[in-house]
Amino acid sequence: MIDPKQFADRFPGDFVFGVATASFQIEGASKEDGRKPSIWDAFCAMPGRVYGRHNGEVACDHYHRWEQDLDMMKEMGASAYRFSIAWPRIIPEGTGRINEAGLDFYDKLVDGLQARGIKAYATLYHWDLPLALMGEGGWTGRSTAYAFQRYAKVVMARLGDRLDAVATFNEPWCSVWLSHLYGIHAPGEKNMDAALHALHYTNLAHGLGLDAIRQVAPQVPAGIVLNAHEVIAGSDSEADKAAAERAFQFHNGVFFDPIINGHYPDDFMSALGDRMPVIEDGDLEVISQKIDWWGLNYYTPMRVADDPTPGAEFPATAGAPPVSKVKTDIGWEVYAPALKSLVKGLYDRYDLPECYITENGACYNMGPEGGEVNDQPRLDYYVEHLGMVADLIQEGIPMRGYFAWSLMDNFEWAEGYRMRFGLVYVDYETQERIIKKSGKWYSALASEFPKGNHRSSEPA
C-alpha cells in the first residue's frame, strides 16, 4: 500500500484535503424545527421511485449528532468540510417566512467548524428544493430563480462572515437532466421541454445567487460545482467523434458556455434553441458573472457512440462499452485517466479560475468484520485518482483542494441506503460510525496538511 506520508509530498503544503456531504443525504430530522418537505421528501414517498422506499427522515441523524461528526472529522485530519444547506430549513415554503431555527442549526455547525480549525465550504443548493415551489413549476418556473436569490441573500447575511467559500449549485446536470429529462431524480419528469426550462432557470438562479452573495458577503469566494463529464468517443469513426462533441455540448457546454462565455453552445441551440424558454435581455450577463473558483465532481467517464436512428433527438448518442474491467458496486467504470484528461480539456476550452475536486470517491458496500471495514478497492480508487490530481498540479493546472465523497455512508438518492460511498461506515440501526480502512489512509494523508512546502508564487 502506498505510504500516505510519501504520497503527501506530491501536493503543495497549502493544498486543502477535505470531506464532503449533503444536507438531505445525512441530516434526517426532516420534520423538526420548522423544516417543511422538499421535492425529495415527496419523491421518496412515491412507490417505485427510490429503492425500498427509503427516505431522508433519519438518514445519518447528523442534525442531532453534528458535534460528534465534527469531532470525527477533526480526528480524521480534514482541514475543510464541504456541506450543503437545506433550503426547506431556512425558508420552508421556498418564499415567505424565514425559519430562524434552521439558520440556528447552520450557525452552530459553522461555529463548530471554526472551533475545530476546519474550513467551511458551503453549497447553497444540493437538490432539496422546497416542495411548495412546485406550485410555481419548481425549476421549470422562472420565479424559482428569484426565490433562490432571496434564499442566498438570507443565508449569506447570517453565515457569510464565517464561510471560507460558497457554491451556488451542486451538479446542476443532475437537477436539470436527471430530474427533468431522464426521470431518475426528483421531481421525476421525463420531458425535454421541461428540462430545457429547468436548464435556463437554474443557470439564471446561479447568476442571481452570485449577485446575492456579492451584495451581502463580497469577501467570500463564490463559485459553482459541476459534474462535468469526460465524454469519450466509442471509436475513431467520424460519426462517433461528432457524437462525442454533441454530448459534450449537451452535458457540459450548456453550463460552462453560459457561465464562462455568456452564451449557450451553437449546435445545442441549433437543435433545441426553439424549445428553450425566453432568454430575456440581460439573462446571459447575469449568468456569466465571473466566478472565483469552480468545483468538479468526478466519478466515472461517459463513453458515447453515434445514435443513427432517423430523427433521434439531440445529442443523438448511445452508450459505448467501458474500457476498464473494474467497476464499483454501483456499476460505474473505474478509469482514473479520464479525470486528468477532463480537467486538461476543460482548461484548454475555457478560461477557468482555480479548481477544487469537490467530490470524488467510490461505492463499495463491504461492512464491518471484527469491528474493521476492509474496503481496499475504495482505497485503491482514492490513490489512483489523487495521483491524477497530483499530475495536474505538476502540469501547472491551478488545483487547490480535494474533497472525498463522502465523509460517511448516507442516503444515495434513488439508490436509497443500499449504496455506500463513505470513508466512515454507518450502521443505520444504531447510528454507530466506524472509520474504514480507506478512511484511516485518507486521514493519514490529510493530517500531513497544511505543511511547509507552500507554493512560492501564485500563478498570475
Image (spheres, helix red, strand yellow):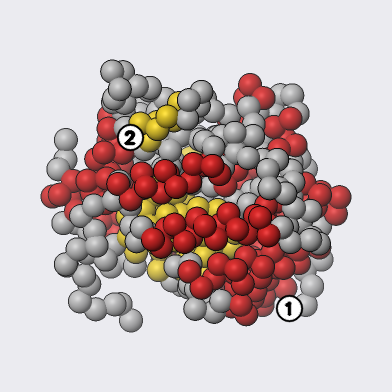
Q: Residue at x 76, y 67 (%)?
A: 146
Q: Residue at x 15, y 49 (%)?
A: 5
**Mark 2: which amino acid?**
Ile
* Quarter of the figure with residue 186: top right
Viewer-closest of 401 and 254: 401
x, y percent for residue 56: 62, 35
Residue 305 can be seen in this image: no
- Above or below for 203 versus 368: below
Residue position for label 2: 435
**Tag nearer the camera, 2 or 1:** 2
Q: Residue at x 74, y 61 (%)?
A: 98
- Please count the marks in the image: 2
* Quarter of the figure with residue 328: top left
x, y percent for residue 413: 59, 36
- Above or below for 94 versus 232: below
Q: Secondary structure at mark 1?
A: loop
Mark 2 vs mark 1: which is more N-terminal?
A: 1
**Mark 2 near mark 1, Cβ–Cβ under 8 Å?**
no
- Compared across the picture, whether 383 is left or right of 44 comes to left
Q: Residue furthest top?
A: 370
Q: Secondary structure at mark 2?
A: strand
> Neighbour class for label 2 at 10 Å: few (<14), some, many (≥20)?
many
Residue position for label 1: 282
Measured in 3D between alpha carbons, the distance from the residue under mark 2 to the one under mark 1, in whole angstroms, is: 49 Å
Viewer-closest of 196 and 176: 176
**Mark 1: which amino acid?**
Gly
